[in-house]
Every structure is written in C-alpha cells, then in structure tokens.
Image (cartoon, coloured by chain):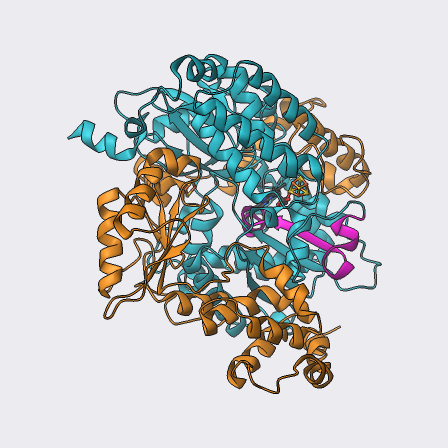
Amino acid sequence: MSPSEEAGRIPGMDDDTTAGAVSTTQVNADRLPAATYAELEQIAARYPQARSGLLPMLHLVQSAEGQVTSRGIEACAEILGISAAEVSGVATFYTMYKRRPVGDYHVGVCTNTLCAIMGGDLIFDRLKDHLDLGNDETTPAEDGRRSITLEHIECNAACDYAPVMTVNWEFMDNMTPESATTLVDDLRSGAEVTSTRGPRLVTWREAERVLAGFPDDLADEGPSAGPASLLGREIARQRGWTAPSVAEAAQAADVKDQGADKAEGETTAGKAGGAPESAETESQAAVAESGADAKHEDNPRNTGEGDA
Amino acid sequence: MSTPIDTLTPVLTDNWGAERSWTLAAYEAQGGYRALHKALAMEPTAVVETVKASNLRGRGGAGFPTGMKWGFIPQDNPNPKYLVVNADESEPGTCKDTPLMMATPHTLVEGVIISAYAIRASHAFIYVRGEILHVIRRLQRAVQEAYLAGHLGADIHGSGYSLELVVHAGAGAYICGEETALLDSLEGRRGQPRLRPPFPAVAGLYASPTVINNVESIASVPSIIDRGAEWFASMGTEKSKGYGIFSLSGHVTNPGQFEAPLGITLRELIELAGGMRQGHELKFWTPGGSSTPLLTAEHLDVPLDFEGVAGVGSMLGTRALQIFDETTCVVRAVLRWTEFYKHESCGKCTPCREGTWWLVQTLAHLEQGQGSESDLDLLDDVCDNILGRSFCALGDGATSPITSSVQHFRDEYLAHLTHGGCPFDREASTVFAREGASA
Ligand SMILES: Cc1cc2nc3c(=O)[nH]c(=O)nc-3n(C[C@H](O)[C@H](O)[C@H](O)COP(=O)(O)O)c2cc1C
Ligand code: SF4
Ligand code: FES
C-alpha cells in the first residue's frame, strides 16, 4: 500500500463534522483559533493512524497556548475522535506537558545522580535562592523582564558535560553556580543568549513548535559537536588509530580460519548465511549466557514466562 | 580473557568533527549514502543476512542480535511492516545517541532506509526524546534533505522501493524507552509496557510487524553494508563483535565519547580520559547506565563486552560509564537513582509502583542517619519482591544500584547510622572543587 494512500484517510478528520457538533455546547465560545486547529489536523495527517499525532499535537497546543489548556485538549479530542478524558490522561502522563503557564524560558537543572554529584544539586539550590522559586515554579510577571520557570530535570543524555542545564531544552553544558546565576540574569533581562552546544535561544513556546514538527530555521546554528563528544576521535587522530581497513579485516579473518577448528567463537560470516537455524540457536545461546536483559524481550519464540 | 585493545576505532564518530558535519553535503563527501545504493541493488533478504553475519548485537542495552530480530518479521503477514528507531536515550548515564544525531543525523537516516528496506517496511519512525531540541532540529533537517535528494519518498532511486520517515518527538517519560511502551506512546497513548507475547515482530505498531532498534544499532548498518560483515566482525571479541561508543562521565580528567572495539577495559578508557581527576581514586562505576549493577576498582580489567560484564554480575547495557571517586557518597548516589525510578515507574504493576516508593523511604531514612541496620535487610527484601516480579525491566533495573551497593559498600550505609547522617562533604565531589584544587 502506498503511504500517501494511507495518509488520505484520517479517521479523526473524517469524523470531524459530527465530533464537532456533539462536543461543544457553548458555540465557539472557547475554541482554538482556526489556524492552530488546522495545524493540529496537519500533524494528525502525518501518521498512518491519526492518533499517533497526539504527542506532537499537545506540543503544538503548548506552543500556541503557553500550556496545555482545556480548549487545546478539546481540539485534540475532536480531531482524533476520542474523548477529552483520554487526551487528558495522556497529557498528564508526560512531564513535558504543563497544566500551568510556563515562562518565556523553561530552565532545567539536571539533578540525576551524576550531575547532582558533580554540582547540579548546588546549582539548583543556588537558583532557587536567586530566583526565589521552588521546583516547577515561575517568576511573577514584571515589566520589561522575561519570565523563567525553574525545574529540576532527569538525566538529559549529556553526562559528559556535567553539570548540565537546559534552557527550553537546549543544552547549557559544564555549568557552575556562578555561570547559572549569570545565565538566568541574562535571560530575565532579555539579553541574547546562545546554547553552549546549539543555537541562540528561542522562547519556550517557539521551542514547543519545533517539537510539534514545524521546524524553525536554526538547524545550521551551533557546532557539530561539543569538545567532549569529539575527545576519542581527536585522540585517535593524534595517535593514528583507525578502524581496520577492509583488506586488513579480511587478512585477519584468513589467519583465524586457518587456526580454527570448530572454535566456539566461530559464529560469524558463512555460517549465518548457510544455516540460519543453527546460527540462531547459537546466537540465542550467546545472548542467554550474557545475561543481558534477562527478559529476552525481542524473541517471539520465547514465551516470556521463564524468568518472571 | 582478551588481549588489551590498543586502539580506538572511530567509525560512527569519525565524521563528528567535520565542517557542517550534519549536512547532506558533508555526509556525502565522506562516502555517505554509498551503502544505500549498494543495499538497493541487493535483495532485502541478502541485507538481513549480511547484518546477521556481522553478528551486530543491539546497542540499546539488551544486546539482542539485530539481524535475527529482522528475520523474525513474518513477510507473509499482509499488514504493513514498520521500523521504529528508539531515540529515547534516557537511561541515566547514557549519552551516545544524542551526540550522534546532532553531529551526523544522516548516518542514522541512511541506516533507517537500509534497515527498512531489509524488512520491507513502508513507514519508519524516529522516536526521539523531546528534551533534546537541537538534535530534533538536525534530524528534521536531515530527513528533509534526504527527501529532496530522493533517498526517501516514492520509488527511491528508481528501485521501486518507497519509504516515508517521520521524526516524532516524545514528551518526557523514561519508560517510553522500553520498546513496547514506546509503541503505545507512538500510538498516542500513555507509555505503558505491553504484555508479550505477542511480540512487536508479529504485532507491534498498529498491531503490525514492527522492528524496534536503538539509534546506534541502526547507525551501524551503513558501515556493515559498505565494508562488509567480515570487516565488522573483525573487531570486538568472540561473541561481542564490532565497535561501540563508550561514554565516560564523572570524575575523570576528561569525560567524553570513545569509540572502541567491544572488549576494551575501563582501565584503558580511563587512561584515554586522562586518568581519574587529580589526586583522587576510583570508587565505583556503572558499566551501562544506572540499571546495571555497580562495579568497583576491582573490575578495572573486565573486558567491556556482553559476556565479560555479565561474568562479574552486571551488564554491558549502553556502555554508559559513570565514574565516581572516593569523594562520592554511594548512599546519596543510590538514593537519587532510586528517586528517579520511583518518579518514572509507569504505575502499571504493583511490585514496581509500590516497591520503588518503599525503597525511596527506606534509603532516605538511611541517608539521614535514621533507621537501623535491619533497614538493609528490608531493602534486600523489597528488591527481592521487585526483581523478576515486575512487568517490565524498569523494575528490575531499579534494584540494581541498591543490591550492588549494599554488597560492595555495606559499611558505608552503616556509617550513616553511626554518624547520624551523611559523613561526606558535598562540595568535595563537585567539578568546581576540582577547579579550586588545580588553581
Ligand atoms: C525502562 C527501559 C528503558 C529503555 N530505554 C531505552 C532507550 O532509551 N533507548 C534504547 O535504544 N533502548 C532502550 N531500552 C531497551 C529497549 O526496550 C529495546 O531493547 C531496544 O530499543 C532494542 O534495540 P536494540 O536491539 O537495537 O538494542 C529500554 C528498556 C527499558 C526496560
Ligand atoms: S515494572 Fe514499573 S515501569 Fe514496568 S510496567 Fe511495572 S510499574 Fe510500569
Ligand atoms: S546525569 Fe545529568 S545529563 Fe546525565
């Protein structure tokens, strides 16, 4: 089946007229602007089944509304042909969705173990003091100042840059309590701030729009990688280390073949191609031996009960 | 035991520093998409066989053979087939897929196209955690460029094969890295694990045959197709073939990413990272994220492959090597991880939902120097009731740091009781303390 054919039939959109008629009693009193509604429909249309669009749709609601709102939930429900309660149940499951207004800048401090120990706990304490905020709270509105929502976050896949912060989910690497307070002061004053490993910062609402799958034009900003990401590569270059060439690998294999009578390591090449059955059992044994992920979650032939 | 590995083998990381490495032009200048053309000239089954022959094992933690997983897709099933890339990277300590997607998203995109072709999928998804915005931008751009270049879309390069690829941002939930929870999330639901069987290979996304693979697994595929299964299998150890990205974080002089053959040791890696930070020594480490039991200085020479790490009672996991020196309080570290598991427990099953709550209570008491020695038995007991009894591996993982730390550092737990609180100075373990020391 061609993908475009599948995308042509969007269950939620086909239901649109009826769903709209039943679900809103106070006619249009509190509906999302038509343009936003249309973009929500666009998101749903990206998927073979419209409901798959719900997470990005909620990101778009946050972008348009500054938080997940009731009318945003209603719109998603209507478009997908599910109940508002179902949408709400999804929205509350995920930590990035907020039911209270978020500031211009969402400031995250990683306090998962590694960052916490490397200084994240002290940074978070300092920022709470400095901004006079508790976790997940927002600075009060003030003329001429941008608002900040402060939250401690979990490991953000940047541990080699600990202690890590984020602003609107852009990386701020290798922070200290001092650089953290300077950062939030700059943000509040509206100064232009750039991610240490990314572009100049946009607002939280603009960021949410990218998460909804409507790209901005900033992909080309920022470096390809930070210094820690490149460390092993640099060392390899300095020392002239590379992966083997294809020829070297073939040579090494020849030498091995000559020496090997049916050694247990002989699970490679020819065998897997020639006798899939035996290759499978062998690899399965290897996996079982390794004890890695005891649940063998990927093997449909495993009934899954053995280890439970 | 393995012979020492005396070289790094940059393959995936090789292009990370290139000028505008994330662009199609830079990627193609380094030979990118050559493997795609080669694959499209092969039968899909031949692509599967090549990956099988390489003995590539999943890089998302479990180490399941990738080619075999692809082989489970029932091609006689009339439903569409799907490929889903697990880019949720949320296991504490894990930080390899994120720089890969930021620096060279096209490596992943090319891998997706080849892998989807191999299993005859017409739709593929990259499920990427929502909290890494710039990575998402780079992926979106790469996919857009690939469409424009004819690498994606209808009738790719005249092969008759068509593929749609969607970059899908998650919304903050560690459990969505578990593959069946990920599928529910991708269907627009709460991310809760599914009962198996049926397995995703048979009834995955939209109840159709689905392959789910980690970013690094899929990103390894172009190199295997381009340079051959034999080449890939020439690296690594007996049963753990190929190269992998090892992520060192914490109290080493220079944290970072090191791509090496599987089987390298922590001793070798720490040396490459410039040693432990000045004046300090290794206390404990995780081999593959917080869900893998802690190891100590005793284990510096264990080959970091699936068998080697399993042999000392832990798991290779995601090669997320979080390194802690003697300034670190192990109880504080373990409590924080446990709070994480409690927070991320999806609530579907009782052992994990209730158990992680109890574990946090008990550990918090111990850390504050309250409670008694019998609390250590209580921890043990609760862990026993979670391990193997929870619905998915999150619950099992939650017990790893606790059981292993009590085993290696029982005295330190007890010291909190005699000291009436934590005997460690929090400042001493921070990176700013290191700056102070060297100034
Ligand atoms: C709680 C939990 C979280 C997980 N998180 C991830 C993740 O972020 N990325 C990943 O690739 N695999 C993760 N996994 C493993 C996946 O379930 C699955 O095994 C993996 O994606 C398969 O890919 P592979 O065979 O290529 O390794 C997680 C598993 C569990 C139980
Ligand atoms: S083990 Fe935890 S995360 Fe997994 S299903 Fe049970 S409650 Fe959910
Ligand atoms: S622990 Fe903070 S980014 Fe991983």
Considering the image in quadrants, where does the N terminus of chain A appear?
bottom right
Q: Which chain is cyan?
A: B
For the stretch drawn in magenta, the main secondary structure is: helix
Give percent across and percent down for residue B21: 38, 58
Taking the image as shown, residue A223 lies to the left or right of residue B132, namely: left
Quarter assignment of residue B305: top right
For ligand 1, the image quadrant comes to: top right
Give percent across and percent down for residue B267: 41, 22
Taking the image as shown, residue B186 lies to the left or right of residue A233, namely: right
- The answer to whether residue B62 is visible is no
Image vertical order of residue A208 relative to residue B17, above or below:
below
Is A84 within the magenta?
no
Image vertical order of residue B392 relative to residue B153, above or below:
above
How many dots with numbers?
0
Give percent across and percent down for residue A68: 52, 67
- The answer to whether residue B130 is visible is yes
Considering the image in quadrants, where does the C terminus of chain A appear?
top right
Q: Residue at x 53, y 18 (%)?
A: B406
Is B203 within the magenta?
yes
Taking the image as shown, residue B387 lies to the left or right of residue B177, namely: right
Image vertical order of residue B414 relative to residue B225, above or below:
above
Give percent across and percent down for residue B327: 33, 23
Quarter assignment of residue A24: bottom right
Q: Which chain is orange?
A: A
Q: Nearer the viewer, residue A71 or B251?
A: A71
The stretch of residues the image draws in magenta is B198-223
Q: Nearer the viewer, residue A270 or B99?
A: B99
Q: Nearer the viewer, residue B114 or B287?
A: B287
Q: Residue at x 32, y 56 (%)?
A: A223
